[in-house]
Amino acid sequence: MSTAPSIQPPRARRSSSLAGNVNVELWGWLFMRVSGVILIVLVFGHLFVNLVVGEGVNAIDFAFVGGKWSSPFWQVWDLLMLWLAMIHGTNGVRTIINDYAERTGTRIVLKSLLYLAFVVTVVLGTLVIFTFDPCPPGSPADLLPSICFS
């Protein structure tokens, strides 16, 4: 006669706690709720400014982005949106991997690829936001957007 594995009570401490009293899954769950609310504000604010204020979608071009990112406010706004969206999405996919990847090796590979994609996207996105220069020095004046002074 074989013994069936016992099922833990839903509120029991899991092995996913890092140190004694820290429950990683609880903090991940709480982060998803808080970041989701903040992301709604950031995304709808982004859409409102880009699509409703001004000339709408027809006005979005290289000069529009260059002018927007010349303001530290919009750099921080877009950086927060990028970071929160990436952390929120990565945490969600991590949860799905934990739920559906049955073998430990598969779970490690999938989560490693997920974290690599997260790091690459966040690093490149952050660099683009803070190093973007719509008016590079030495560029021909006819190729520069209208916001640049030649």
Image: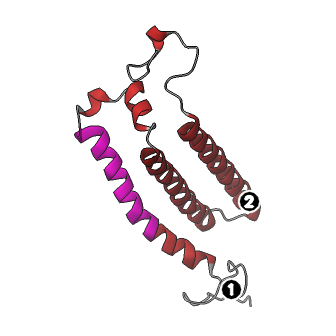
Amino acid type, label 2: Ile
Horizontal and vertical percent for residue 34?
A: 44, 69
Residue, disc 1: 5
Q: CA distance from mark 2 to mark 1?
A: 24 Å
Q: What residue span does the magenta drawing correspond to? A: 33-53
Horizontal and vertical percent for residue 105?
A: 76, 60
Q: Residue at x 31, y 39 (%)?
A: 50
Mark 2: few, some, or many residues within 10 Å (few <14, many ≥20)?
some
User: Is 25 rendered above or below residue 43?
Assistant: below
Give the main secondary structure of the magenta stretch: helix
Q: Residue at x 24, y 34 (%)?
A: 56
Mark in front: 2 vs 1 = 2
Horizontal and vertical percent for residue 132?
A: 54, 33
Q: Nearer the viewer, residue 103 or 22?
A: 22
Q: Relative to 147, is 113 on the left or the right?
A: right
Q: Residue at x 72, y 57 (%)?
A: 106
Residue extending farthest to the right is 105
What is the quadrant of the N terminus in the image? Answer: bottom right
Amino acid type, label 1: Pro
Residue, disc 2: 108
Q: Is residue 52 magenta?
A: yes
Q: Nearer the viewer, residue 99 or 60?
A: 60
Q: Which mark is residue 126?
A: none
Question: Which of marks 1 and 2 precedes in the sequence?
Answer: 1
Q: Is residue 149 magenta?
A: no
Q: Residue at x 55, y 13 (%)?
A: 139
Tell me the SS state at disc 2.
Answer: helix
User: Is 80 rendered above or below residue 66?
Assistant: below
